[in-house]
Amino acid sequence: MLIALAIPAVLVLAPSSSTAQATATAPPGTTRSQPSAPARYPERPVRRDIPMTNTIRRAFAVGTRDSTGRPGRNYWQLWTDYKINARLDSGRSTAVTIRQSGQMPSPIILKVDFATTGSAIRPMANSRMADANTAIVTWPVDVWFAGSRTFTANLDFGGRAITKITLDPNGRFPDRDVTDNVWPRAPAATKPTGGN
């Protein structure tokens, strides 16, 4: 004996102990007035992770993005690290040596502050005057393309004394240590001792 059940779009046959065979067909004239029980499919495990591209997945893994998509703890993969090495010599021009310690080359932008009194300031070709006693001097990034890790910026503004030089004055480029971007260097802050 063979028992046949008709389920919409799915036919289930269950053999019994009989050797007889039968084909299951819907009886003529039957309609679907009664809704039948829905078929149960085997359950699949639910995917808990969010579908994302491999690029985003790698960004999460290395910490350059966090779970919200904002920059993560390692967002700046390539840091600039420039230092100003300067010494005072008598003369009309000033030579500033900039050392690239980081991995990313960037343009050189120097803010030069002058004394309020003295001879007239003669602007350089690659400079613009921010005010009467301050000049912004720039060199393009290609000064690093020859492979040198140092660049000497020759400043010739005439005889006016320079009081301060600041590298990357607007903080456009990521830098591990911005305290060495200023000449003359500020005195190091002393840590208070834990005495009574």
Image (spheres, grey):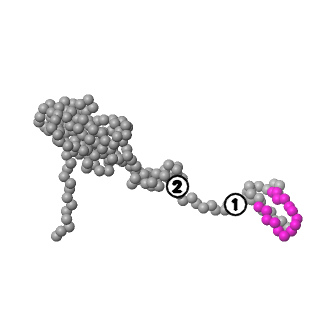
Identify the element where label 1 is drawn: loop
- Judged from this view, the residue extending furthest toward the right is 20
Locate residue 152: give its quadrant: top left
Magenta stretch holds residue 107: no
Which quadrant of the figure has residue 11?
Answer: bottom right
Q: Secondary structure at mark 2?
A: loop
Question: Residue pushed farthest left?
Answer: 117
Which of the two residues, 94 or 43, is positioned nearer the viewer here?
94
Gap between marks 1 and 2 measured at Cα: 29 Å
The residue lying at 33 percent from left, 47 percent from top is 101
Residue 173, above or below 30: above
Disc number for residue 107: none
Q: Is residue 59 left or right of residue 159?
A: right
List x then y, in percent, for residue 122: 19, 30
**Residue at figure coordinates x 39%, y 47% from the top left:** 78
Specify the segment rendered in magenta: 12-26
Q: Is residue 4 left or right of residue 114?
A: right
**x and y percentages locating residue 171 in the rendered image:** 29, 44
Q: According to the image, label 2 marks what residue? A: 50
The residue that appears at 82% across and 68% down in the rendered structure is: 16
Q: Which residue is mark 1?
A: 39
Question: In the rendering, at what x and y percent does residue 163 appear?
Answer: 17, 41
What kind of secondary structure does the magenta stretch mostly adopt? loop
Say whether disc 1 or disc 2 marks the residue closer to the N-terminus. 1
Depth-wise, is mark 1 or mark 2 nearer the camera? 2
Badge 1 amino acid: Ala
Inspect this view and state whether residue 97 appears: yes
